[in-house]
Image (cartoon, rainbow, N blue to C red):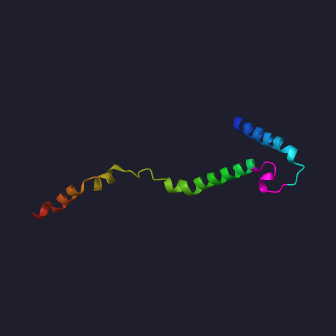
Amino acid sequence: MKLKRWHWIFALALLGSLALEIPKLGETPVEAWDYPLFFALMGLFGCLVLSLFAKGVVSPQLDRPEDFYDASEAELDWTTESPAAREDALTDGEG
């Protein structure tokens, strides 16, 4: 597998983040964000969760069959006509 440019950029960003954390490695972490690479890994985790949510939950809700907007169904639908035209169509035979 050939690494793409964004793979290298991501790897360099992780290494750069770790390099900036090296001076603090001797300290005892007090909070969760005191651990090395916390924000990089949290961002990666958040991105994965949002992607899986969008792919698994939102995508099936937005998918439509190929003939969803079929022209033959549009002719049967009266919602494009005005209410007055519908009333006229219903009362034409009643004299």
Q: Is residue 76 magenta?
A: no
Q: Residue at x 44, y 50 (%)?
A: 66
Horizontal side, residue 93 vs residue 82: left or right: left
Is 84 positioned to the left or the right of 55 in the image? left
The range drawn in magenta is 29-38
| Left or right of 52 in this view: 80 | left
Residue 71: percent from the left, percent from the top?
33, 49
In this picture, residue 62 sits left or right of residue 53: left
80 above or below 95?
above
Question: Residue 45: horizontal and vertical position, in percent?
Answer: 70, 52
Q: Quadrant of the C terminus?
A: bottom left
Residue 26, can we see it?
Answer: yes
Please give the name of the residue rendered at 19% of the width and 60% of the height, measured from the top-left corner.
87
Query: What residue is shown at x 70% (from left), y 49% (from top)?
Result: 43
Q: Which residue lies most toward the left here?
A: 95
Secondary structure that dominates the magenta span: loop
Residue 59's spot in the image, x, y percent? 54, 53
Which quadrant, please, contains the N terminus?
A: top right
The answer to whether residue 2 is visible is: no
